[in-house]
Amino acid sequence: MNSDSSPIFFLFRVINFIIIASAATYIFHKYLRKPITEEIKNAIDRIQSLIALKKQKDVDLELEKTCFAEQILKEKDLTKKINFWIQENKKEEANKKETISITKARIQEKIKKQLAEKANIDLRKQILPDVLKSAKKELTLDFADQQNGQLFLDKIIDSMKNGEA
């Protein structure tokens, strides 16, 4: 009989296996289980932390996209307002220029009228004394005779009565 095939040898082999497996299990539980479970927990925590960071990053990215889109809309609105204000300012400037030119023309016209009036007044001041002297001489000569004076006054009174002024 061969020693490898005997039942006792097989029994001892099973017992040795159980002893070695028990010793390995004991050593595993005593020395290795705690560090391995802690390492697994740390790995799980890191993974969960990375997942949370990715979710937060995605939320931040969406928020940033939304803010960017809002900024673009605000920029477009501001550009429209600025262009509108520029157009309104141009219209207002054109109206002011037109008003200024109209006012300038009116002032120039008024100055022309005033200058003409002043020239007329100056002319009257220069000519009037001569005209009065001349008229006084002529009237004195024309009405030297009392009859001519009376005829002239009668004509004036008749025209006033008839309304022929």
Image: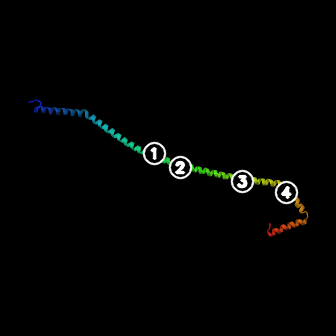
Give the mark nearest the N terminus, 3 or 2. Answer: 2
Q: Which residue is mark 2?
A: 81
Q: Dot 2, how many residues are within 10 Å of its Cα: few (below 14), some (14-19), or many (20+)? A: few
| In this picture, residue 136 sits left or right of residue 55 | right
Mark 3, residues whose alpha carbon is within 10 Å: few (<14), some, or many (≥20)? few
Query: Tag 1, which secondary structure?
Result: helix
**C-alpha span from label 3 to label 4:** 30 Å
- Give, as a three-letter code, the residue at label 2: Lys
Mark 1 Cα within 10 Å, few/some/many (few <14, many 20+)?
few
Q: In the image, what residue occupies the spot 64% across and 52% down?
A: 98
Q: Which mark is residue 68?
A: 1
Residue at the disc numbered 4: 131
Place of residue 13 in the rendered image (x, y in percent of width and height, measured from the top left): 14, 32
| Amino acid on which the number 4 mark rests in the picture | Val
- Which residue shows up at 80% across the image and 54% down it? 123
- Which residue is label 3 attached to? 110
Residue at 39%, 43% in the rendered image: 58
Please tell me whether residue 1 is drawn above or below residue 62 in the rendered image: above
**Element under label 4?**
helix
Q: Residue furthest bottom?
A: 162
Q: Real-space Cα distance between discs 1 and 3? A: 61 Å
Residue contact at pointers 4 and 2, CB within 8 angstroms: no
Q: CA distance from mark 4 to mark 1?
A: 91 Å
